[in-house]
Structure formats: C-alpha cells, structure tokens
Amino acid sequence: MALTLAFEALGSGPPVVILHGLFGAGRNWLQIAQALAADRYRIYLPDARNHGASPWAESMSYAEMAGDVLALIEREQLHRPCVIGHSMGGKTAMALALSRPHAIGGIAVVDIAPESYTGQFSSYVSAMRGFDMAGAAGRREIRQALADRLGAATPVDILRKNLRRQDDRFDWRLNLLATGLCMTELCDFPEVLRTTCYAGPALFIHGAESDYVPPSSLAGIRALFPHAQTERVADAGHWVHADQPEALLCSLREWLAEARAAIPF
C-alpha cells in the first residue's frame, strides 16, 4: 500500500519531482529546486518513506517507493512530470520509469546506476543508532562523535541534517531500524526490472570523483534506458548537488527543456 508522502512544492509551470537519496530529505535539494522554480517549473520535493516528515514503514523496497511517488503524482494530478533522483532516489526514479513509463515524462538520475552496490551505509546506521542521544549537549557534539566513529571522509553534515530536537533531547527523523533492516535491498536493484526498458528521455549524471558510476556501468544503463544521455561533472563526488550545484543545474536545465519538448500532450 502506497504511503502519503510529505512534500514541499514551489514555483509554477510544468511539473518536476526531485527524489532525494538515502539519509536525505526533500529540503536537501532546495537550492536546485529554487533555481528551477525560477525557470518556471513547478517543483515537488517529497520526503521518501522513513525519511524527513513522511510516514514510517517496516519495508522500503524500490517497488514500494516508486508506488509512493506514483501515488503523489496521481494525487496531485501531475501530467507526466520529469523525475530527478539522486542515489536511492535515482533508483526509485528508474523503478518508476521501468514499471510505469507512461506516468512520467523522463528521468534524470544523479550518481547511481541500475546495479548492486556494497552496503557501506550500514556503518552509518550503526553509528547513528549507537550514539547516546539522551546525553548529547548539542549538534556540534553529535557531529564530532559521528566523525570520530566513521572517519573524515564520511558526509557527516548530511547525516546531521536528520537531527531533530524534541522535549529537550535530540532524536533522528530517519527510521534507522527499518533502514538498517532494508539495507541489502536498498543497495540492490530489482531483478524483475532488468528484463524491460524505458524508451523515454533519460539523463545519467555522475560525479567525476565518485566511484558509483564507473565506465563498466554504462552498458547496463543503456540496456534499460536506450536513449540515455550521460554526463560527468568535474570536481564532484557522490553528492553532486552539494559539490557542484551550478554545473548540475546547467545540465538539468538543458535536459529538462529537451525532455519537456518530447512529451506528447
């Protein structure tokens, strides 16, 4: 059963849905959303299940998360929106495109491919669950503790955005239990979707400093998305929207104009 996702919307014009990644929230993409809204798009920023202000659930398969997004599209009566997705959100966008191609106008996938990855994020969940939140004096202390446990290369500031303060104590907005239990599934890609393809507009953008989309991934991308364009963003890691927002915006603006022009009305 699809969940009713919390979301923010801004701007007016053709609809665009932006799906955040694991440990994220819709507001992580607010800078990109504001810029695209200024270009006369209507931008939707949903929080995925078990993230942000959206409901929690025990499971979070890509079929379920694609169903949540489809329910949002239908509830808001969006006409074939373009869907942008980063990491987990990119896999959700791919799952939606492959399972319900006529519901959307195209997908832009940021730094992820339709394949399996090793579960390095499990250590993030363990560190976040293992921290004594009751004794935390402030966000800076929590940030430092996570950095000490996980290492300097960990995107601690992104993890820290999941903090909230309730009744004079800190807590996590993220459903860490469900995320941890579903980590193997989140790092995989549904086998049932590997036998079909999406013939609509598709853009795959990856960070030059990221190892998530190596050259060996391109054949798999084009097998499922035969019209895929691929772009590489210099000086960007996995979180392209944080590392190089202007370069990402340039690519998205050009692709959105082309994708919208190709949508039949």
Image (cartoon, grey):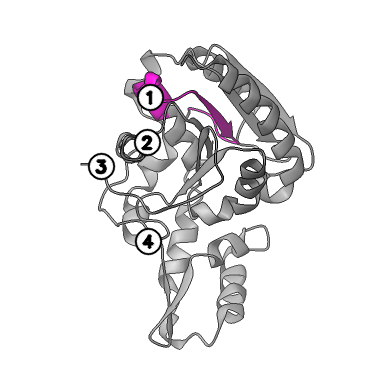
- Please rate how many residues cluster around mark 3, counting C-alpha atoms within 10 Å: few if below 14, some from 14 to 19, many from 20: some
Picture coordinates of residue 207, whole percent (x, y) = 70, 38
Q: Earlier in the sequence, mark 1 or mark 4?
A: 1
Circle 3 SS class:
loop
Q: Earlier in the sequence, mark 3 or mark 1?
A: 3
Q: Which residue is mark 3?
A: 2
Q: Which mark is residue 73?
A: 2
Q: Quadrant of the N terminus?
A: top left
Question: What stretch of residues is rendered in magenta?
Answer: 95-114
In the image, what residue type sits under mark 2?
Answer: Ile
Picture quadrant where residue 177 is located: bottom left
* Residue that lies at the very extreme toward the left in this rendered image: 1
Picture coordinates of residue 196, whole percent (x, y) = 38, 13
- Report the Cα–Cα distance between label 4 and label 3: 20 Å
Q: Which mark is residue 176?
A: 4
Q: Earlier in the sequence, mark 4 or mark 3?
A: 3
- Report the Cα–Cα distance between label 3 and label 1: 16 Å
Image marks 2 and 1: residues in contact by CB distance under 8 Å? yes
Work out whether 64 lies above or below 219: below
Picture residue at 50% right of the left edge, 13% below the top: 223
In the image, what residue type sits under mark 3?
Answer: Ala
In the image, what residue type sits under mark 4?
Answer: Leu
Circle 2 SS class:
helix
16 vs 155, left or right, is left
- Report the Cα–Cα distance between label 2 and label 4: 27 Å
